[in-house]
Image (tube, rainbow, N blue to C red):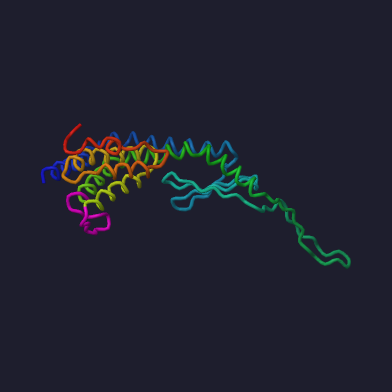
Amino acid sequence: MLAWLGWGWIAAAMAQNAAPEELIVEGHRLTEAKEALHQELKSRGYNRFLQLGPRRWYLNPKLWKPGVMIHEEGFARVRGRPIMPLSVRYMKRVAFRPSYVEGVFLLQSKGMRRTQKAELVRNLEPHLRAIRDARWAMVQPRREADLQAELARLWFDRLDTHGTYLEDRAQIREALFQRWLATATGEAGGAMRAIIDIFVVDVVQTSNDPFTTEECQDVRARIPSDREPPSWANRHDLQNGQR
């Protein structure tokens, strides 16, 4: 019960300490990240765009270039064009020849489209990540407080995100790891994983139902190659208060 109150107090404090000045700074950071992405696309010939709600479609006058959709949350969709019209003209009837339409089209191979898309995505990703990180920084106190409450609900009340009661502690430990896996990449995901790691070390591994040695081994085997294993999965001696 004391642990629950302690984590609840931390969550409330984090939610209340979001200074307006910090939000202004982070808002400026988001604006700069969006502008940098816009300039990157502009330098590549995408100097026209169409705004549709939270999405912005960038167009390139070179019709064989892939289309780009940027979502305001910092995600992109790049689509290549297999067939593009270069010119179309209407030919009037002459003598005994009927009227007809004449067109010239460009056909691109799958390999060419794949290469264009990969090159564009590779150059846009740093800017997109900067937008996602800036957005995360603006909502970080609230998101962290929400995660604190979610972890406490899962461990102390045995309720998952759907409100389902979990009888088995092994199910709860697996749910904690799945929440760790579900975190995003970049600054936001790293911050959320750090909160989960602290919770597991301070609450789960010091309880009577810590991650077992076998579970820690299984966790390490399922961690994606682009992530570092959490400390509690590498050091099973953290259970029962031993450090």
Relative to the observer, which residue lies in front, 178 or 72? 178
Pinpoint residue 207: horizontal percent, then vertical percent.
Answer: 16, 43
- In the shown orientation, is residue 155 left or right of residue 40? left
Q: Quadrant of the C terminus?
A: top left
Q: Is residue 26 magenta?
A: no
Q: Residue at x 44, y 36 (%)?
A: 33
As drawn, the residue found furthest toward the top would be 243
Pinpoint residue 201: horizontal percent, then vertical percent.
Answer: 22, 38
Relative to the observer, which residue lies in front, 188 or 168? 168
As drawn, the residue found furthest toward the right would be 95
Q: Bounds of the magenta span?
A: 154-168
Q: Quadrant of residue 194?
A: top left
Q: Residue at x 58, y 47 (%)?
A: 59
- In the shown orientation, is residue 242 left or right of residue 67? left
Q: Quadrant of residue 198?
A: top left
Q: Residue at x 56, y 38 (%)?
A: 42
Pinpoint residue 52: horizontal percent, then vertical percent.
Answer: 48, 53
Q: Is residue 162 magenta?
A: yes
In this rendering, the answer to whether 203 lies above or below 96 is: above
Relative to the observer, which residue lies in front, 183 or 135? 183
Pinpoint residue 172: horizontal percent, then vertical percent.
Answer: 24, 51
Main secondary structure type of the part rendered in magenta: loop
As drawn, the residue found furthest toward the front would be 214
Q: Residue at x 49, y 50 (%)?
A: 51
